[in-house]
Amino acid sequence: MLARVVRIAAVVAILGLVVTLALAFRRDPHDIRTGTIGKPAPAFTLERLDGSGKVALADLSGKVVVMNFFASWCLPCTQENPALVRVYERYRASDVVMIGVNYQESRDNGLAYVQRMGMGWTTVADDDGRVAFSYGVFGPPETFFIGTDGIIAGRHIGPIDEETLVTAIEKLRGQAASR
Amino acid sequence: MNGRVAITVALVALAAALLFAARPHEVTADERIDQITTELRCPVCQGLSVRDSTSETARQMRDIVAQRVREGKSSAEIEAEFRAAYGDWIFLSPPVSSWSGLVWLVPIAAVGAGLLLVSGRLRRVETPGPVEPSAPQVAALRERVAREEATEG
C-alpha cells in the first residue's frame, strides 16, 4: 500500500516537473514577470539630460508611458534605437509619451549619445540608479509600458523591436479607450 | 593537582569567552548593512551577493541599503522594497514561505519519499518462520530415531 502511494507520488512529481518545464519553455524570455508588473509605477522626478528642467511621472497621468532604460555603453541599446525612433515618430502627436532613462552613465556621455542617435523624446538622468531599482531593472535596455491608470502593464528585457512596441502601446490605448 | 587547577581555569576562561562572544548585543548599522547585502543578489553578476560584488550596480544597491538603515527602516522593510521590485529572485536564498521555497522543500520531500519506499521494501522482506517438515521428512526422522534406539537398546 505504502509503495503504491510512493509510486503514485513519484509519477505526480514527474508529471509536475514536465508540465512546469513545458510552461517555462513556452514563455518569452524577454517578458519576465517580476514584482512590479500589475502594480502602480513607482513615482519619480528626474532631471532632463539636457538640463532643461525636471520630469515627474505624476505629470504624465492619463497617458500611455513607454519608459526605456538605456546607456551609450550598451550595444543592444544602439541596436533597438531605430525601432524606438520610428515608434516615437509614429506616436509623437498622440497620448503616448516616451521617456528614455539614462542608466549608470555621466550626463555628458548620455546627452552626446541622445543627440548622436536622434532621440527626440524626453530623456532623463537616473544618476544614483534609484529609479532603475524601484522598477527592478536588471540592466539596459529594458522597456516598461505604463497604462493611463498608472499601472505597469508590461516590461521587455533586452532590445525591443517595432512590432512589440506598437503591439504593447496599442493594447494600452485600447484599454484606455474602453474605460 | 596544579595541572587540574590549570585545566579548570582554562575551561572556565574558554566558557567565559564563548559566553562573552555569544552575548546578545546591539547590532551596529554596518553589521545590518552587511547582513542585508549578503542576502541580496547582485542583478548583473553571476551568483554574487551585493556585498561581495564590485559592480556599479551592487555599489548603488549598497548605498540604497545604507540609506534605508540610516532612515531607521527595519531589515524586513528594506528587503520588502527589493522584493517589490525584483521578486524573490533578488534573494540568494529563496524564502521558504513563497513558491520559490519549493527549492528547499522538494529535495526534503524526495528524501522522505525515498526513505518511505526503502522502509516499505525492507518490511516486505520478511524473515522466514519455522517451516513444517514434510511427511517423508517426518518418516525419515522417525526411522532414524527408531534405528538409534534399537542400536542403544
Image (spheres, coloured by chain):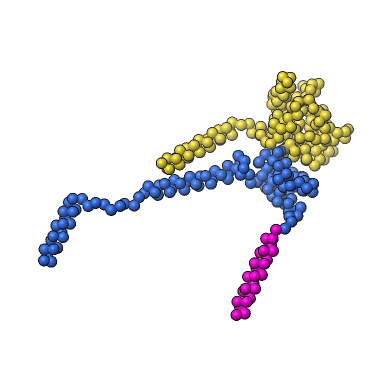
Q: How many marks?
A: 0
Horizontal side of residue A174 vs A13, given as left or right: right
Report which colour depicts chain A: yellow
The residue at the point 68 percent across, 45 percent down is: B41
Report which colour depicts chain B: blue
Tell which of A160 and A57 is nearer to you: A57
The residue at the point 13 percent across, 61 percent down is: B147
Horizontal side of residue B127 vs A178, given as left or right: left
**Residues in magenta, as a range:** B1-24
The residue at the point 60 percent across, 39 percent down is: B99
Tell me residue A51's x, y (percent): 88, 35
Quadrant into which the C terminus of chain A falls: top right
Tell me residue A124's x, y (percent): 82, 34
Residue A32 figure quarter: top right
Quadrant into which the N terminus of chain A falls: top left
Residue B4 among magenta residues: yes
Tell me residue B43's x, y (percent): 69, 42
Tell which of A73 and A101 is nearer to you: A101
Horizontal side of residue A34 vs A46, given as left or right: left
Secondary structure character of the magenta stretch overall: helix
Q: Outermost residue, bottom direction?
A: B1
In the rendered image, is residue A166 in sight? no
In the rendered image, is residue B101 in sight? yes
Tell which of A133 and B35 is nearer to you: B35
